[in-house]
Amino acid sequence: MRASRFLFATLRETPNDAEVISHQLMLRAGMIRKLASGLYTWLPMGVRVLNKVEAIVREEMNRAGALETFMPVTQPASLWEESGRYVQYGPELLRFKDRHDNPFVLGPTHEEVITDLARNELKSYKQLPINFYQIQTKFRDEIRPRFGVMRSREFIMKDAYSFHTDQASLQETYDVMYDTYCRIFSRLGLDFRPVQADTGSIGGSGSHEFHVLASSGEDDIAFSTESDYAANIEMAEAILVGERAAATQELKIVDTPNQKTIAEVSAFLGTNSNQSVKALLVQGVADETGQVPVIALFLRGDHELNEIKAEKHPQIAAPLTFATDAQIAALGLTAGFVGPQGLVEKGITVIVDRAASVLSDFVAGANQVDQHATGVNWERDAQYTEVYDLRNVVEGDPSPDGKGTLQIKRGIEVGHIFQLGTKYSEALGCKVLGEDGKPFTVTMGCYGIGVTRVVASAIEQNFDDKGIIWPAAIAPFEIAIVPMNAHKSPRTLEAAEALYAELQAAGYDVLLDDRNERPGVKFSDLELTGIPHRIVIGEKGLDAGTFEYKGRRDAESSNLTKEELLIKIAK
Amino acid sequence: MRASRFLFATLRETPNDAEVISHQLMLRAGMIRKLASGLYTWLPMGVRVLNKVEAIVREEMNRAGALETFMPVTQPASLWEESGRYVQYGPELLRFKDRHDNPFVLGPTHEEVITDLARNELKSYKQLPINFYQIQTKFRDEIRPRFGVMRSREFIMKDAYSFHTDQASLQETYDVMYDTYCRIFSRLGLDFRPVQADTGSIGGSGSHEFHVLASSGEDDIAFSTESDYAANIEMAEAILVGERAAATQELKIVDTPNQKTIAEVSAFLGTNSNQSVKALLVQGVADETGQVPVIALFLRGDHELNEIKAEKHPQIAAPLTFATDAQIAALGLTAGFVGPQGLVEKGITVIVDRAASVLSDFVAGANQVDQHATGVNWERDAQYTEVYDLRNVVEGDPSPDGKGTLQIKRGIEVGHIFQLGTKYSEALGCKVLGEDGKPFTVTMGCYGIGVTRVVASAIEQNFDDKGIIWPAAIAPFEIAIVPMNAHKSPRTLEAAEALYAELQAAGYDVLLDDRNERPGVKFSDLELTGIPHRIVIGEKGLDAGTFEYKGRRDAESSNLTKEELLIKIAK
């Protein structure tokens, strides 16, 4: 590509409304432009990256034996009613009516459509397993779209759906997809981690998320210093460490006027927050009479409640809901000063986090306004109903697999694989005939990659103060050639043209920067847009038989012979 | 691809609701399935074809210097209000509101979005000309979607939009696009014609449609036997031939009880319909007072009115509207028996088609119930206001370029290139700075290809009673290899595997039909799905060192040596 015939829509200033670096750099590098809230047009610079990501995803999905399909963006509402999601999905599902007043949705995902296809097309167990995928536009009516294409309303996904006779077959395809995703993200040049994930409201039995590690990530992921263990923090188990020491202190009630938070109380008493417990009063599952009990959760003062874990407890209502002031008052308790003493005796279920359960001589609320208790000890002073894993892991916790300790990093979710089981096949009646001639409900898996999001996440992971630093596999151009004073020196232009032709013939994606611009402008543009290799051709170099080469991550350029140059680029 | 791992969703029966052959065969060959009215899922067999069409389109657009972009499917209504099309477009434009009650449309086309982009990104004449394209999903809320993907609601288009300093630059890019379209449709293996087209309501100054010739086409196209002239019948000029002969008969009034149509009257009088004129009474353009005049059009009895031509007449209302019974009665005329005699005298504008204007001694209505006049002659018996080209050309008419005569064939419109001029750039204020430093409104062109429709039209042009006959460039697989009795004979399977590997390595797209099915089933499927080359491997052939080869259009198979086979396929 000749730069003079391309659209370099680069910006020197950082746009005001772009919060995250990938959004800023995608705007500045002229990759995208906003059409409306959460809607972006991809400019030529962006499409080149997008197409490369798509090509790698397609190639690896094909290699894995998945069959490409293409489903409509618009979907009849009736299918969503069959699955129950027409109501469940909430306002992110954009609903509309066509000219004949028939209800439709803009597809945020395609489980319903593919399950409808499968129930019509698949007849026999002999056709299984089968894995369909597509690369297609999705729409999610986000209430507050932001971060550019990271959380836009319209986006491109690769979504795949597999159909199986049983769980063992699903597990096999799931494992293939796991490996395929690893290969895809490796080929894309990303530093990523597959992590165990919560299966959430979609249901099903197993799930992994694929995260690109980047400090701007919205998710915390925990992984072992010494093994492959990695999990979304929602899922990472906090192992019980140590045993409870014997009590050494007497329980004392101390005045703590207006000291409600753990930080305030610890500072006031001169204790460490990890020697105290904090109470969280939440709503339990309603009993037969419709009565909603309050359940008391106790965690160590320095730990955070993991809501996902709490919601999984059979006695705790999901979604997690804190007890109201009225409910707390009805129990004779005082918010901010709740301790475990006497609660079980009042008929309250007390669930204690593992780490809190091994404390002794700890600080807790005294169940009186402006008072706390010190020297509290379980069993002697306070009873509990159950010990349970309630907290988020923290750095340094032992890895649940027993190998090493946990580190926590931020990640951007770019892929998700999921064992759906029979959630959709059951709802839509997707059955095939088994070996015994009897119909059975198929087992399903689904596998997504946020294609547009991958582009943004690659930038979040690879940038500096000059701009984007593309992994070579998805750079809009792999190599840029800059002839110096091209408009005055036919010699540099000729040499540039010759090298351009040679590198293109060798299969490289090359940009010849033949624009009538100052070198400084060109260099800035090439750095901003993240081209991995830059070759400058000047009079001096031509005399010396060298090219001025600079890799995008290099601090300095170096003068290389043609042979050295070709070796450098081939790396 | 191994057939055992592919989805062969072939059907033996022709689905009831499929009217045209491409729709029938796309369903039967397992290429598409209906999701809802006008919405189709593309199955793996269909996607393979679609991807090949897209790849050729993309390659040629890139070669032509167009820059790929990707615009949202959902578009803010405000842009459509700016262009005036929010109201004009009618109910095919699907309008909806998002969760914040903001109005949007599902894009049936992207002139507004790209012009908005251009007005923000293009600053100077130095950036022109520039041509942006995308391959993207469109939505048109057809009132009666039909013919499968030929007239669906959701479909894929390649749409391109170019921006220019002036008409000369537009013409240059237009010519490049014309050539590019010819190259694209040639590479796709289609028999097509570029034809002059009407610019319709979109406005602008020049337009060509690209038609795939097929008897099922919805459009009539006229082209010369001896030159490159080709035009949509809407546009083809009917040249005046011959001169009016002198009158030889007296005007006579004859009774023609209940004989209203030209066919009835001609049969009744024993005359030829080309010796009569027929009247069409239409509404004129309203005058200053709002009064709508009736205009009388006269055509030769055997000719058809061309509504597009009529609408272009400055005195005739567009869209063409026939006069009401009340309007006709108010003029003292009788529908079915209207003749030109005395009309001009009544103040009625009489427009005569060129061919009708050279008749003499003709038959016409007598302006009396159940009566016609014979021996009518212009000027002597009937006056007219104007002679005008009002009719559709017919086969045998002279070509408007003076070379040869016209033939008429049916075509399916698969591409359209269009000189938009400043229609959108004016409406949206898309200006850049000129060489003189002053802003000017850019000139635009647009260029569309119906990608999904191309697939259907290729079938309409290439099929027989066994199924589809794909042009090699877009066949889902180029070659099918069928090992005979593969499940019993390891020898044929081994030979098939070896040939499969060899042909794949040579770059062919090969299907190895390893399904556990009878040969008859496989042969039917391969013919139905239109695979160009079929190679059967049997014991006998292996003994003789030959392969049984059959091209999809061949009546008989032939036994070829490996060398002969490779030569055959390479063609």
Image (cartoon, coloured by chain):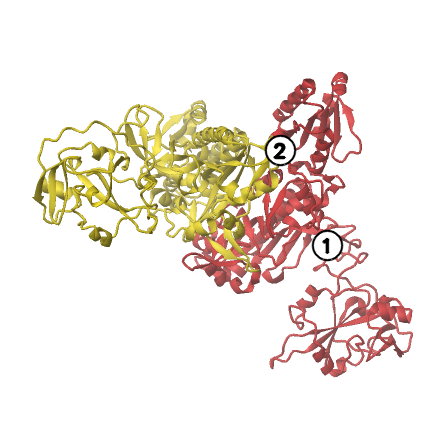
Chain colours: A red, B yellow
Q: Quadrant of residue A60?
A: top right
Q: Tell me the quadrant of the picture where the C terminus of chain B can be found.
A: top left
> CA separation, marks 2 and 1?
56 Å
Disc ID at residue B437: 2
Disc ID at residue A221: 1
User: Is A312 left, or right, of A549 in this rendering?
Assistant: left
Measured as percent of width and height from the top left, residue A492 is found at 69, 20
Is residue A493 shown to the viewer in this render? yes
Measured as percent of width and height from the top left, residue B518 is found at 39, 42
User: Is B12 left, or right, of A5 in this rendering?
Assistant: left
Q: Residue at x 52, y 33 (%)?
A: B61
Q: Quadrant of residue A542?
A: top right
Is residue B514 shown to the viewer in this render? no
Measured as percent of width and height from the top left, residue B317 is found at 33, 45
Q: In the image, what residue type sits under mark 1?
A: Ile
Q: Nearer the viewer, residue A452 or B66?
A: B66
Q: Nearer the viewer, residue A99 or B456?
A: A99
Task: Tell me the chain of label 1.
Answer: A
**What element does badge 1 sit on?**
strand
User: Is A359 left, or right, of B371 in this rendering?
Assistant: right
Disc ID at residue B53: none
Measured as percent of width and height from the top left, residue B556 is found at 33, 30
User: Is A334 left, or right, of B9 in this rendering?
Assistant: right
Q: In the image, what residue type sits under mark 2?
A: Gly
